[in-house]
Image (cartoon, helix red, strand yellow):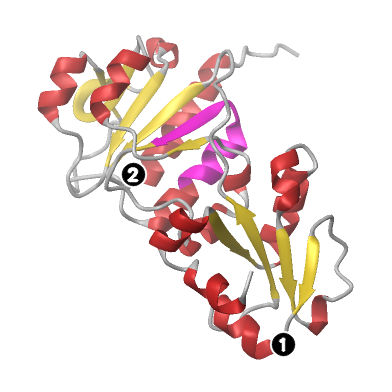
């Protein structure tokens, strides 16, 4: 792909039309290479490097470019000199026991990337994004994920109205609800989270019969960061499903 075409991939419309996104930096490329070892489709990635990385060992087709060209395609102010071109892949099929985290109109790419890191850490989660959510292949979201984006199945543009037909047991995070520490919290198929600004649409929640849960706090502020809320919920689900070990 030409340098000018690679540069266009910094914009969502071109990522969608070209079916590719960019991954920048040593750590992300290493995580990509690990993921490609178990995913044949990712082996079609291409690597663009400056002279400093021309000896980088990679299974991908490699192109050596100059610093000026690297500055054009990289989003960071001081690029390391290594960028991968990655195809957008369809989500994998759900597996038995997998749970879904549904994010409604989340806007912050840093929050999304951090959430993906949490889901990858615990494993067994799928991430569903509503329409009008931030693009997970946005450069900031990709970098914030620290490579988790290659290990968590992601589905985009999933209407909230479609969730009830897909999952039987649905929970949501609300200010008024059952305590998160309830043993029943681990028993749901899908967990709904709204953005800090707008939350979840209550009319749709009522129609879906989503069971509300809450993270108890001191009510000093109006809301909890959505990434922090997902962290605590994923931990609680994981803690609840792992039996105690008696030593």
As helix, strand or loop, the secondary structure at mark 1 comes to: loop
Q: Which residue is mark 1?
A: 66
Residue 150, percent across and down? 62, 45
What is the quadrant of residue 151 in the picture? Answer: top right
Which quarter shows the C terminus? top right
Q: Quadrant of residue 83?
A: bottom right
Which sits in the foreground, 236 or 188? Answer: 188
Horizontal and vertical percent position of residue 101: 41, 30
> Can you tell which of label 1 and label 2 is closer to the viewer?
1
Q: What is the count of numbered marks?
A: 2
Residue 123 magenta-drawn?
yes
The tag earlier along the polypeptide, 1 or 2, is: 1
Q: Position of residue 89 (x, y in %)?
A: 57, 42
Query: Any magenta on residue 105?
Result: no
Q: Residue at x 48, y 71 (%)?
A: 8
> Looking at the rendering, which quadrant does residue 47 occupy?
bottom right
Asked if 3 appears above or below 90 in the picture, the reply is below
Q: Which residue is mark 2?
A: 226
Q: Which residues are magenta?
A: 115-128
SS under mark 2: helix
Q: Is residue 218 left or right of residue 3?
A: left
Check if mark 1's residue and mark 2's residue have beta carbons within 8 Å: no
What residue is drawn where x is 73% and y is 51%?
Answer: 44
Regarding residue 15, the answer to whether it shows in the image is yes
Q: CA distance from mark 1 to mark 2?
A: 40 Å
| Image quadrant occupied by the N terminus | bottom right
């Amino acid at each position: 792909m030409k340098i000018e075409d690679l540069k266009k991939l910094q914009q969502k419309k071109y990522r969608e039309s070209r079916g590719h996104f960019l991954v920048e930096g040593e750590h992300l490329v290493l995580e990509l290479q690990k993921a490609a070892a178990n995913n044949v489709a990712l082996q079609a990635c291409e690597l663009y490097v400056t002279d400093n990385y021309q000896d980088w060992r990679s299974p991908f087709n490699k192109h050596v470019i100059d610093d000026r060209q690297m500055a054009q395609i990289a989003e960071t102010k001081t690029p390391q000199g290594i960028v991968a071109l990655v195809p957008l892949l369809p989500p994998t099929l759900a597996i038995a026991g997998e749970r879904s985290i549904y994010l409604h109109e989340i806007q912050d790419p840093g929050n999304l990337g951090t959430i993906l890191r949490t889901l990858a850490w615990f494993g067994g989660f799928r991430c569903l994004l509503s329409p009008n959510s931030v693009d997970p292949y946005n450069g900031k979201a990709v970098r914030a994920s620290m490579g988790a984006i290659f290990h968590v199945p992601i589905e985009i543009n999933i209407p909230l109205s479609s969730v009830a037909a897909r999952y039987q047991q649905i929970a949501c995070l609300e200010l008024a609800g059952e305590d998160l520490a309830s043993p029943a919290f681990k028993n749901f198929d899908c967990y709904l989270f709204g953005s800090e600004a707008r939350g979840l649409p209550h009319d749709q929640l009522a129609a879906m019969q989503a069971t509300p849960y809450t993270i108890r706090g001191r009510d000093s502020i109006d809301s909890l960061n959505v990434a922090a809320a997902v962290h605590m919920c994923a931990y609680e689900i994981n803690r609840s499903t792992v039996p105690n070990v008696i030593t």
